[in-house]
Amino acid sequence: MNQLLVTLGTKLTERWLNLLVLPGALFLGVLASGTILGHAHWYDVHRLGEALDDLTARPVLDRAGTAAVAVAAVLLITTALSLAAQFLGSAVESFWLRESRSAFDNRRRRDRLRAWERLTRERNAAIRDPATPAAEIRRLDLARARIGLVPPSRPTWYGDRLQAAGERVEAVYGLDLDAVWPRLWLILPEPAQRQIEAARTSFTASARLGAWSLAYLALAAWWWPAALIAAGCALVARSRAHESMEALASLVESAVDVHGRDLAVLVGLEQADGAGPLSMDTGDRLSEMFRKAGLFDTDDDPFET
């Protein structure tokens, strides 16, 4: 039991350091450096060293109690900064997945849809032409897929990729993914759940990194090199978010492909000794069952005894 507590304590400490203390400490260090140097002396490392020497030379820091309070204050500040970044990261994630119908978002959606339709026309024309090389058709497929696997209906690629997972599942199996997914999740084996959770966590971490990029961009008002840090964080966040969302959507579709029929067997819509993938008819029946549509469409009280 003691070994278990030690192991859990070590893991919690590592997680606390990685998620809260280290990112906040890095930002606090850049904030302090930028405040000291400013725009005029942005490159002056000697000036920064003098400031550190003046700070450490203060007699008050020689007292153990004061030093302990200072360390505790730094830890609290860095933790608070990281928690604020997590909160802002949630807002960034919601922004990436938004379904807004504002004028700006509608224009973005229309532009993406026009580009998708243009590439579709070019691809179809290339397929009809026997002289078109296979490599050119593949290039058009990849170019269209970078915009979306289905006609774009949201202002961002991230939202469309999740939307595409639902539309593709419904097109092949007749499943309403929103209604079926919570039940399917309950029967997924643990390795599959871990992979999906890892992809979801990675997307959240990418949004949190995007939030840090906004924080560093704000810091650039006092120290312009922080804008370079912000740009680097934003580029990495975008790349990781794209990879993790692609992985998440693919894993969700794969879970339906592999385990959709298992769910139908468990609820009695398919025979356990049957063969083949989930049929469209069974998928429709699963969706209707889990939507619980029509439950309150009559005047009778369904819970009346």
Image: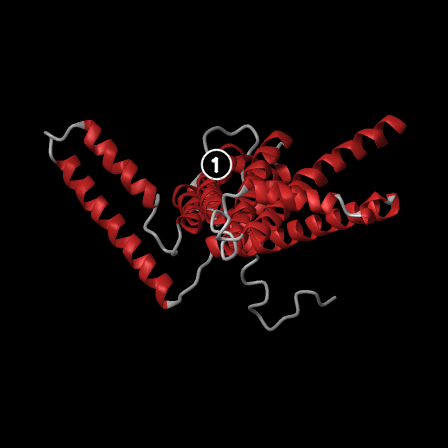
Q: Quadrant of the N terminus?
A: top right
Residue indicated by mark 1? 247
* Residue at point 52%, 38% (across, down): 260
Mark 1 neighbour class, 10 Å CA radius: few under 14, some 14 to 19, many 20 or more: some
Between 12 and 149, the residue placed more toward the observer is: 12
Between 111 and 233, the residue placed more toward the observer is: 233
Is residue 268 in sight in this rendering?
no
* Residue at point 60%, 41% (across, down): 185
Q: Residue 244: percent from the left, percent from the top?
A: 49, 39
Q: Residue 298: percent from the left, percent from the top?
A: 57, 70
Is residue 186 in sight in this rendering?
yes
Rendered position, 231 above or below 126:
below
Between 154 and 264, the residue placed more toward the observer is: 154
Rendered position, 98 above or below 237:
below
Q: Which residue lies furthest to the right in this view?
A: 2
63 left or right, relative to 266: right
Between 102 and 68, the residue placed more toward the observer is: 68
162 left or right, relative to 48: left
In what element is the residue under mark 1? helix
Q: In which quarter of the image is the C terminus?
A: bottom right
Q: Residue 104: percent from the left, percent from the top?
A: 36, 64
Q: What type is the residue that disc 1 sits on?
A: Ala
* Residue at point 69%, 42% (across, down): 53
